[in-house]
Amino acid sequence: MRNNLSTDWKNVKDLVIYGFGKVAHDNIKFFKTHFNILYIVDSDIGKCNCEYQGIKVKHIDEVIEELGNKKTVIMTANRNALSIGEALEKHGLKEGINYCSMEQFLTEWFWTYEKKVCLMEVHTTITTRCTLNCKHCNMFMPYYKRHIDYTADEIMNDLDLLFKHVDYIVAYRLLGGEPLISKELTKLIRLIGDVYGDRIGSIGVITNGTIAPSEELIDVSKRYDVQYDFSDYTDAVDYRDKFNNSVHIVKDAGLRYRVNNSMRWCDFGFPTCNRMYSFENVREHMLSCGPLFHGLNDGKFYYCHVSWSADKAGLLRNASDDYINLKNLEVSDDSKKMILQHSNGEIAKGFVKLCKICGGCGNDNTEYVKAAVQMDRKQKMES
Ligand code: SF4
């Protein structure tokens, strides 16, 4: 069970950030606008002894003795936050007193001291269609019998519902399938930027780079400082020229972008050869996976966006507490708290129904597969 923040976090101005990876790169800008970042620490010496946005990056051994007098926010994937917490506890630091995870800080601190609902990362699928057919796709896109394309207006309705209760989203990402297939993407980004630009820290698109961004999309992306996350699957699929072209277009436009070329995925098992987690262990299993991003689709807010997709694909019917139905939600402090609790994994039955049979990507799943292995046509027809 997580400890609440101690009362001396109330007037905190200075923070130490633990972790100098993808999560920190995505979020430090937001933290800098609210707090003074003393320094960033990491246990990987290769990432240390440099500066990022004017903030020094130090090795943990250099500062561990002084962290007892500071407040530290762990800015990593949840699976790493657990082991960092354990290491800090060995040095006498206490969760909730000396340190906490970034998601806890954003949800608990902003609610307790500023009465604001602040969410860390929210994802929305704009289309379930994709240019690839990845057998182990964690959104199960090749397993959809009927694909769905959302309109920009439909997704704006979802955002309208969420922003009735939520003050700020640090990172909002549009994904697919392959989002650049969608004819509505440019319009949607324009609408989001116009209506909610001041309530979203950064708008982003997650793409496999198979489709070159159009001029119109680039123009609107520049206007709203859209970040592109390219998943590079060119080791598994032959599309290197297309990929390089897409990255160059974004780079030449001066947009923020990142290329992710992890060639290993956790094998979720689902839907091909489901694991079965025992009732006693399934909550722990869910928290080990601990998705940092939550889902928004169909007027519902999901702790686990993967579970939304499993249901949408017709693979597993969600339980009613796997999500919050925003369409039925009155605006009240109770509703706001419910959204904050849900995003922290506080679910009535303790876990998302899919977690019982899904391996997830926590430290307890050591089954790996090569990323982006394609399903052959026969497999797809049988699925
Ligand atoms: S283990 Fe649970 S939380 Fe993780 S991806 Fe699977 S269903 Fe989602």
Image (tube, rainbow, N blue to C red):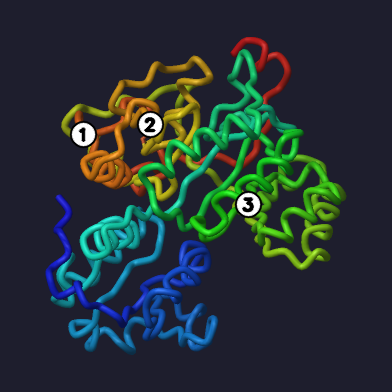
Which one is closest to the eye, mark 1 or mark 2?
Answer: 2
Q: Earlier in the sequence, mark 3 or mark 1?
A: 3
Location of the C terminus (image quadrant): top right
Graded by Cα atoms within 10 Å as few (under 14), some (14 to 19) or many (20 or more), the crowding at tag 1 reads some
Graded by Cα atoms within 10 Å as few (under 14), some (14 to 19) or many (20 or more), the crowding at tag 2 reads many
Residue 304 in the figure: left or right of residue 320: right
**Viewer-side residue, 9 vs 189:** 189
Q: Which mark is residue 326?
A: 2
Give the secondary structure at mark 1: loop
Q: Earlier in the sequence, mark 1 or mark 2?
A: 2
Ligand 1 resides in the quarter of the picture at top left
Rendered position, 131 above or below 72: above
Q: Residue at x 48, y 41 (%)?
A: 266
Q: Residue at x 33, y 44 (%)?
A: 343
Q: Position of residue 195 (x, y in %)?
A: 58, 49
Q: Residue at x 30, y 38 (%)?
A: 331
Q: Which mark is residue 13?
A: none
Residue 169 in the figure: left or right of residue 127: left
Question: Mark 1 highlights which residue?
Answer: 350
**Viewer-side residue, 80 vs 178:** 178
Question: Mark 3 highlights which residue?
Answer: 194
Q: Quadrant of residue 128?
A: top right
Q: Position of residue 137 (x, y in %)?
A: 57, 33
Give the secondary structure at mark 2: helix
Q: Quadrant of residue 211?
A: top right
Which one is closest to the eye, mark 2 or mark 3?
Answer: 3
Q: Earlier in the sequence, mark 2 or mark 3?
A: 3
The kind of residue on which mark 2 rests is: Leu
Which one is closest to the eye, mark 3 or mark 1?
Answer: 3
The kind of residue on which mark 3 rests is: Asp
The yes-or-no answer for disc 2 within 8 Å of ligand 1 is no
Rendered position, 216 above or below 271: below
